Amino acid sequence: MKVIDMHCDTMKAILDGREVDKNINLKHNNLSVDIEKMKQGDYMLQVFAAYTNMQEGDSLVNCLRTIDLFHNEIKANKEDIGIVLSYNDILKNIEQNKMSALLSIEEGACCKGDLGLLRNFYRLGVRMMTLTWNYENELGFPNEIIDEKLVLDRGLKNKGFEFIEEMENLGIIIDVSHLSDAGFYDILNNTKKPFVASHSNARNICGHRRNMTDDMIKKLSDRGGVMGLNFYSYFLNNNVASDDISKIEDMIKHVKHIKNIAGIEVIGLGSDFDGIDCKVEIENSSKMQILAEKMKKEGFTENEIEHIFYKNVLNLFKEIL
């Protein structure tokens, strides 16, 4: 079963790891994602996030450093993986028996509210972006606690509306993961193309604010968007502690619920590998086929699993890229 994963934080993990071990790389490492593990897991495409934390210095500089690492690592492994700038690049990589790498940004603050910087990120290969991470920025509000108040009712700022218009014009996929509830509806009501929640689950099954309500999931489905199943235990089960294991049975509960309320076409994968701090039953990217096997045992058809594992996201990429 081919795999498209809409979100991992491996590039930032490699960048951080180099402060301790300068030899850590994408080919082979002790992280959840590397070239060798992805091959074993039968990956078609991995979306690599250039994640930045606004509290760790200049977000623009840190994002550019991560993007530089991304390009260097993909180039170093060009026999196995190629960068995706358009849908045709995915097809070319398949023909050449290569995996694909798509570059995303996690934290729109790196653009500093400047559309020129957004366009430059597009020129550097960025094809997906979350407007926020866990902090308020120039574009809008996250689904986090700000000034002791859970912010779900404050959405995009004026700059945010400008950005989503330009993102649609450029062909940068809008990613609503981490965005407030109000921000989700601002995007829904002010865009035309499909968008994604690259690594978010169902709030009905696990009440964490990072997950999506049934209404959001239905609206995302109606738009032709896709949400990526997040492997973080806190987003899968209400009753876990941070050291509890992320279980496949919980993942399948989310998938069944989403399928029942919005159909199979809205479901994809968004592991959040190398960005989550819990043990995972699917230990790393080499083990992804375990999830497909469990889904079969739970009554999902081969066709349904194909749609979840890669076809739904591939169709969205075909439309937007």
Image (tube, rainbow, N blue to C red):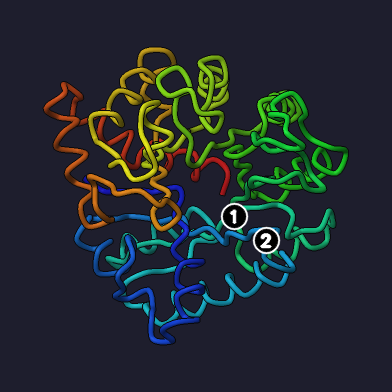
Tell me residue 193's x, y (percent).
Answer: 64, 33
| Residue drawn where x is 56% and y is 49% of the image | 321
Residue picked out by circle 1 = 127
**Residue furthest to the bottom:** 22
Left or right: 315 as drawn, with respect to 296: right
Q: Of the residues shown, which amino acid type is indicated by label 1?
A: Arg
| Residue drawn where x is 54% and y is 60% of the image | 103
In the rendered image, the quadrant that contains the N terminus is top left
Q: Residues within 10 Å of mark 1 (few under 14, many from 20)?
A: many
Foreground pick, 312 / 213: 213
Tell me residue 120's x, y (percent).
Answer: 74, 66
Residue picked out by circle 2 = 122
Left or right: 3 as drawn, with respect to 24: left
Does label 1 or label 2 sit earlier along the sequence? Answer: 2
Which type of secondary structure does the marked residue at label 2 adopt? helix
| Residue drawn where x is 33% and y is 65% of the image | 31
Q: Of the residues shown, which amino acid type is indicated by label 2?
A: Tyr
